[in-house]
Image: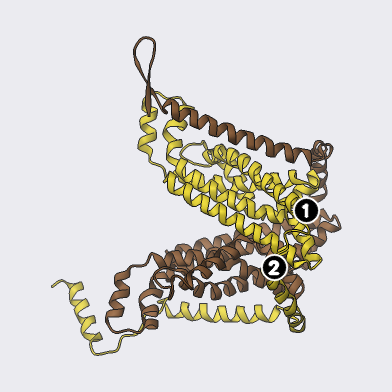
Amino acid sequence: MAERIDPQGRRIWRRFTPAQSLLRWSAWLIGVAAFVWCWNRISESTTWFFVWDAPRIAGDILDRATPPDWSYIDRLWVPLWDTINIATLGTLGALVMAVPVAFLAARNTTPSRWLLRPPALLIIVATRSINSLIWALLLIAIIGPGVFAGIVAIAIRSIGFCAKLLYEAIEEIDETQVEAIAATGASRWQVMAYGIVPQVMPAFAGVAVFRWDINIRESTVLGLVGAGGIGLELSSSLNTLAWGQVSLILLIILAAVGASEWVSAKVRGAII
Amino acid sequence: MTVSEAEAQMALEARLGRPWRKPPLIRRAWLRWALGIGALVYLALAVASVEVNWARVYEGLDRGAAFIAAFMSPDFASRASDIYAGMLESIVMTVAASVVGIGVSIPIGLGAARNVAPLPVYLACRGLIAVSRAFQEVIVAILLVAIFGFGPLAGFLTLSFATIGFLSKLLAEDIEAMDRVQAEAVRATGARWLQWINYGVQPQFMPRLIGLSMYRIDINFRESAVLGLVGAGGIGATLNTAFDRYEFDTAAAILIMIIAIVMGLEYLSGIVRARVQ
């Protein structure tokens, strides 16, 4: 905060000192220059003729996509079931793997801070930074296309997310309860089961449901690379330019995502 | 001794001498059993409906081992120019989309906060946010590629759109939970609407906005790595080709670069967040 003296000698309030203003303006200048450069690069590799034509194309697609092809719905139930299974089983698999990783990564429960914590953190970062579609591509190359590849992809992708939130919850527990259990002469595992686990259980359930909700959304697209679920139907409808089917699939996805969000909000509301 | 204390005393007397058992997570017995049995039935059905070709999986183990080995010796060199072009395009898309997305999400976020915006604006903004959040980036990208043609423009628009849904929602929640007193004080000085937003509301959500923006840049980069799969530009196309040709060493190189950049961004956002909060 600063002030300026105007010609009449009155003091006028200013939000920033001149030095602060200069710094802010130069930061803005660099930012804008970077953006303009990026935009120019995008613009160079864009065929602007197609973009100017876009409103007509969009109108055309919308025209073909309405009304949705409702007769197609009978062929969507099985893929939808697969999609939900990919999300649910994938989340379960992720939780099974995330729990030990989280206990290894939390400062207060890791058996060895120098030997086991860094690899646990590396697993968290590596699994989190790679999108589930890329995991699916990789797994399809390894174990072949199908629902199973999708489940494993979702499971691997979710380890980092679940383990990160979980280990933060473990680090925030109340140590006095742990000490109280330890003071009764409990073994290491008993301290874990009666001192730590009850404290992180709500966080664990919350994370599980939250991730399941995200995974429903992610599993809708896994089929595009061949990993099963409703994305497979979406991909084939897109390839045959059956826009009526595409719009129906999008509606189904919208409904599934809405339902999962509702379930997740309900469950989290009940836990917290 | 009051009635409730007497009851507690009696409950304690009844418990004395009996071994303690861990109380169940869900107290109502019927609900516990119903949920447990329901979960088991669902799991059995779900697992039964997943077809696994174990012979194929067993065959694939070799390829899996090859991939892990490739991580030990990633090949940055033989596709260097493709990797460079793809990475640059991913970064360019991330930067441009983050700038536009954050810029647009501020007015939308203000519009979606009930204590700032009038009802029609509120409903329109909330509707936009709901649509943006419901669809995965890749689905949006497919539609935009169909409309705007192949290339980074579709990816840029996709990421901007996704950023708007993500940031505006969290921003709106933050604004709705803001301290009214400060905003009121600025308004009492006779500030115009824009001044009121600028001096009364904006300083309150700014730290959170900066933190969330950093996080979103991180997400945008990760997403930009897959948009190439559907033709929306970025490193994804190169990565897909590498997988298709079983060139695991090139794929490993790309994945290592993605992980390194994400780690760098996370480290940076940690510093920025620590400074603004």
Horizontally, residue B26 falls left or right of residue B126, namely left
Q: Answer above or below: position of B63 versus B274.
A: below
Q: Residue at x 77, y 74 (%)?
A: A144
Mark 1 lies on residue: B82
Task: Output the chain of dot 1.
Answer: B
Q: Position of residue B217 (x, y in %)?
A: 59, 48
Q: Nearer the viewer, residue A174 or B31?
A: A174
Q: Colour of chain A?
A: brown
Q: Which residue is mark 2?
A: B73
Inspect this view and state whether residue A44 appears: yes
Nearest to the observer: residue B86 or residue A130: B86
Can you see residue B233? no
Of residues A57 and A108, the one drawn nearer to the viewer in this rendering: A108
Chain B visual colour? yellow
Does the residue at mark 2 contact the one at mark 1 (Cβ under 8 Å)? Answer: no
Q: What is the x, y in percent for residue A199?
A: 38, 71
Residue B47 vertical position relative to residue B18 in the rendered view, above or below: above
Helix, strand or loop status at disc 1: helix
